[in-house]
Amino acid sequence: MSSSTSVRTDAPAVVLTGITKRFPGVVANSDVHLTVRTGEVHALCGENGAGKSTLMKILYGMQPPDEGTIEVNGEQVRFKTPADAIKAGIGMVHQHFMLADNLTVQENVVLGAEALHGIGAKARRKIQELAGQTGLNVDPGVLVEQLGVADRQRVEILKVLFRGAKVIILDEPTAVLVPQEVDELFATVRGMQEQGFTFLFISHKLDEVRAIADSVTVIRRGTTVGTADPKTVSSRQLAEMMVGSELPSPETRTSTVTDIPVLTVSGLVLSAPDGRALLDSIDLVVHSGEVVGIAGVEGNGQTELVETVMGMRKASAGTVTLGDDDLSKLGTLARREAGIGYIAEDRHRHGLLLTQPLWFNRILGYQTRKPTAKGAWLDREGAKRDTERIVEEFDVRTPGIDVPAAALSGGNQQKLVVGRELAGDPKLLIASHPTRGVDVGAQALIWDEIKNARARGLAVLLISADLDELIGLSDTIKVMLRGRLVADADPSTVTPEDLGSAMTGAGSTSAAVHEEGEN
Amino acid sequence: MGKLRGNLLPPALAIVFSALLCGLALVLSGANPLKAFGAMVNQVGEGSTAVDIINSTGIYYIAALAVAIGFQMNLFNIGVEGQYRIAAVVAAIFGGSVALPPGIHSLAIIIVAAVAGAAWAAIPAILKVTRGVNEVISTIMMNGIALGVAAYLIRRDVFGELRGNNIRTPEIAESGWVPGIPLGDNGTLFGLVFLAIALGVGYWVMMNRTRFGFELRASGESATAAAAGGVNAKKMILVSMLLSGAIAGLVSMPEILGRDHTYNLNFPGGIGFSGIAIALLGRNHPAGIAFGALLWAFLDKSGLALDNVGVPREIVTIMQGTIVLSVVVAYEVVRRFELASEQRRVGRELASAGGAA
């Protein structure tokens, strides 16, 4: 690591002091302290939902803090909009690229910053000058749609450089990259660091943080718990800082796996419009009383697998069978009626009708069934009664069932969704990131409910980015890579590290992970 | 209750605001706004104005319901205009060329009108479902086509006949008429105003009590969540568009079966567009739409009095425009405010109930 060669000055690049941000019902950040020295790569680490994004939105001027101060290069600043932050030399590269595919590199970079260097030859020269620093070796006139993921990310970095950023926030930059691209990105970051740029690197992947960062600040449940030197701290210590010691264990003790297959997926193929296979001959069996976990770096086909099994995407080939029923030709509603409960990965987009009351949300997905419907008519009383039951049994913290779903905190929304999807005794539960972005209390409750349902013979297909959750809850783990199930792992012996390397396709040295086709 | 306030406050604010704005416009053009508004209110008591307003309300109400059904799932059916015109000409031709017993004759005409409206709406619906064509574009174009088709159908060498200076479809026999309620000097109330009321009740029941209404609302609120909840988006688009078209088809029935008994060159246009504004004003709620339709009809009919006090009648159009504009803004402002205050309330109640938790 090249930290010894990087430029250091007296005033830190960014100092956040006592930042507090409250959202209705939740404190997203409370008393956060963060000091980023000029010329360093500073990692901000924390679990999903720990408050990293909120903090960065505050630093980038997207949201004002309720309390606390921001200093940039020793001067106290107040950002009202991202434009203020950009003016102060702070740039942000978002996790999801914000590029227009049908414009050229130059057009994308210049868009919104036309006043700086015009839109013509001068801007082009500036872009070419800056492109070298990011390692981008393409002509500015090339359309962005022709670029790969890594180059698109460089264009994003180029955008913030073009606007004069000296401090660059990288929000989960590796989530969309394959390992080789991660290495290239890190090389770019180190090169730019030597030229005096400062980086704030947001991640929850400890190995990456240890590989790139000069210092690490850990954020847990909205507050910073400390800063560490990645060269002296171990991954285990970092992990403990991140999750705290009071974290409930997802571990399931006794096996309840039976040999009755509930979900049988065979030869499932899903093709993208351009012919690329998003899912490539997936074979999968989930038995009654079994939790099958799918491990994988996000974007390797887990979402597509779930949505194809749910009938939200139309499979190009293959069959999906639930018990003895062939679901392959059926729509989503019929699949739900056949006995599938579905906890979607994004509860706001797929799980809830945010402005509608809780009892109205109880009906969603159950609009044809008791107790929420009678024939073509809704049973509002039944829906309300059953919502009361869910609120009671799943400890949903709400003043009543008539408040809109948006008024609840994330954890309580998710408890409502879990309660709904476990209602009516489903045969199969598809749980996609069931505890993402929820507080520890809700997480423990959701884990308990999944375990209880499993003990009653429910089959569960679990998708999670939280490897501890995956290992703790699953009876079988399958590793997904580029649309294929490439390996099996035994959750009783596998470690998160083994699983992590299998997920990136690096191959595994552990006996607990078996490459598919080996046996 | 907060919810009621959230529903009533925005239109009230919008009406006050647009009245002020129009008052300002009147002052600027040298007229006395109080006198103008006074003349409009007095006009209601004159001759048949009151009954005209009710008749007109019924017609606007049906048009706005047609639009509202689409709005419920974010479908913008601008084509109500064309759908009711096509339905009117087809139903008038049908009614004028068959002989059926009383009652059955009128019922048959109404059904034909609904089917014709639905069929005209089916074209953009099918285009959207199969080819992804935006319904805004296709329904606007269908409006233009509807004008041409209607003009063609009443040509003398097709179905039309010449009466004086007017070209019209053959008159519907008396067995097909829907008698009104005569109120002497005050005019005649269209019998089919009650159809509008029945449609409003049916609409409310459908939206609030049936599975279809639930799926419609869910689709409008969040297409992705509806899909995950098993709502078939294509089916919903098709069904809601057909339903919208069928109701649109009924828009001209009160006039044709209650007064004109024929489709002619003087056929009133623009009701479909007014329906859009009224549905917005009424927030797709059956009672809100009724209020909006009444307001629209009042402005239309009593605006005639403005000429008497030397104020241009077009001020009414300005007023209608500003009402719609400000009501849209007001709803959004109030909606955001209500949501934020609701979240604060839940947060507060939980904090006081759960203590540190």
Image (cartoon, rainbow, N blue to C red):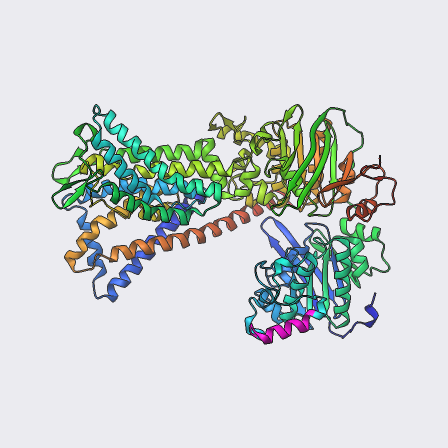
In the rendered view, tell whether residue A237 sits above or below residue B179.
Answer: below
The quadrant in which the N terminus of chain A is found is: bottom right
Residue extending farthest to the front is B157
> Between A444 and B286, which is closer to the camera in this rendering?
B286
Residue at left offset 77%, top offset 46% = A503
Residue at left offset 58%, top offset 50% = A24
Residue A123's spot in the image, x, y percent? 60, 73
Residue B187's spot in the image, x, y percent? 15, 39
Residue A187's spot in the image, x, y percent? 78, 64
Residue B177's spot in the image, x, y percent? 20, 31
Residue at left offset 62%, top offset 37% = A315
Answer with left or right where residue A474 lies relative to residue B41: right
The quadrant in which the C terminus of chain A is found is: top right
Whether residue B22 is visible: yes
Answer with left or right where residue A233 lies relative to residue A30: right
In the rendered view, tell whether residue A325 sits above or below residue B65.
Answer: above
> Between B119 and B161, which is closer to the camera in this rendering?
B161
Whether residue B281 is visible: no
Quarter-of-image position of residue B316 = bottom left
> Between B302 and B215, which is closer to the camera in this rendering?
B215
In the rendered view, tell whether residue B316 sits above or below residue A406.
Answer: below
Q: Please check the rendered image and state whether residue A119 is part of the magenta-colored stretch, yes or no.
A: yes
Answer with left or right where residue B268 lies relative to residue A333: left
Quarter-of-image position of residue B80 = top left
Magenta span covers which residues? A118-131
Answer with left or right where residue B243 lies relative to residue A334: left
